[in-house]
Amino acid sequence: MKDNKVEKEQYQDQVEGRNAVLELIESGKDINKIYIEKGEKQGSINKILAKANERKILVTEIDKQKFRQMVQTPNAQGIIAIVPPFDYCDVYDIIDLAKKRNEDPFILILDGIEDPHNLGSIIRTAETAGVHGIIIPKRRAASVNSTVNKVSAGAVEHMKIARVNNINETINTLKKEGIWICGTDMDTNKYYYNQDLTGPLAIVIGSEGFGMSRLVKENCDFLIKIPMKGRITSLNASVSAGIVVYEAVKQRITK
């Protein structure tokens, strides 16, 4: 019986931080339990408790020592929600969402983003920009966890994320659906603001240290770059994503 309990807990995740937990509750998604650190029943915690009570979610108050043993992020703000593992979608679910909205597909492909803080920031930016979904690889890349959820400020609850075995095979699938693949890379002469980013589009953001893999780069329909004027020749992946994504948003609005 003990082994079964341990195995079951391994398939759970947790969301930490007041804004992230509140977003989670309001999203209507499953929550197994909420833990509150003793002495933290003030401010926005009261709103969270009221919402949890409305949804009949079990809330347990624990002492500071036990709470500190449970936390996975540096600023949990006295609250942890225990949830089932993140529910990744299929690539076609992302395409179907665009069709339902009667919009051209607008997708982000993350080629080996390993830092969960970068992943969380990108998800937050993508959600605010109206991106229909994000595609990440299963290997050598960050997955959605408590850190990603917190950094995204709960945006993961509103973003479709597909986790795939092979990025290149997925790119070929998107191409068959009429979606253009745009890669971000310094080895091109085309600046992002001079490229047409309207229509069905998937933007590839490479890893923090190495950029896109060679095969992914070769599989892109076109490449763009962000101008660099200083001595540092690269940007944080989440910053690069934000710059290019919002250029696409601007072009789509003014089209």
Image (cartoon, grey):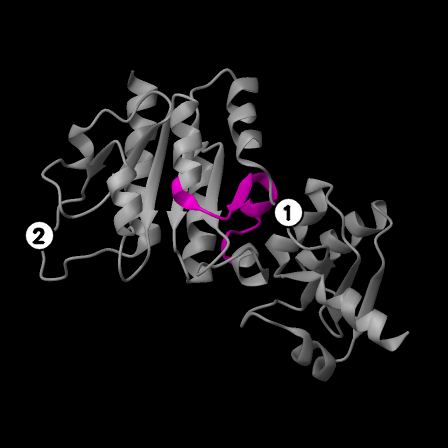
Question: Horizontally, is 213 left or right of 190 in the view?
Answer: right
Question: Horizontally, is 231 left or right of 158 in the view?
Answer: left
Dividing the picture into quadrants, the one containing residue 188 is top left
Question: Horizontally, is 70 left or right of 110 in the view?
Answer: right
Q: Is 156 covered by the magenta stretch? A: yes
Mark 1 secondary-structure assignment:
helix
What is the span of residues highlighted in magenta in the rendered image?
151-168
Dividing the picture into quadrants, the one containing residue 243 is top left
Task: In this rendered view, identify the residue nearer to me: 13 or 112.
Answer: 112
Kind of residue indicated by mark 2 = Lys
Q: Residue at point 62% right, 67% down? A: 77
Task: In this rendered view, identify the residue nearer to me: 222 or 120.
Answer: 222
Is 68 placed above or below 114 here? below
Q: Is 71 covered by the magenta stretch? A: no
Spot occupied by residue 199 in the image (x, y as percentages of width and height): 34, 20
Mark 2 secondary-structure assignment:
loop
Question: Horizontally, is 116 left or right of 183 in the view?
Answer: right
Residues tagged 1 and 2 counted as in contact (Cβ below 8 A): no
Spot occupied by residue 149 in the image (x, y as percentages of width and height): 56, 55
Task: In this rendered view, identify the residue nearer to me: 199 or 82.
Answer: 199
Residue sitting at the far bottom: 65
Query: Where is the N terminus found, in terms of image quarters?
Result: bottom right
Query: Where is the C terminus found, in terms of image quarters?
Result: top left
Q: Which of disc 2 and disc 1 is earlier in sequence?
A: 1
The label on residue 229 is 2
| Circle 1 residues within 10 Å: few <14, some 14–19, many ≥20 | some
Spot occupied by residue 2 in the image (x, y as percentages of width and height): 87, 77
Q: Residue at point 55% right, 30% down? A: 92
Residue sitting at the far right: 1
Kind of residue indicated by mark 1 = Glu
Residue that numbered label 1 is attached to: 23
Q: Which of labels 1 and 2 is toward the front? A: 2
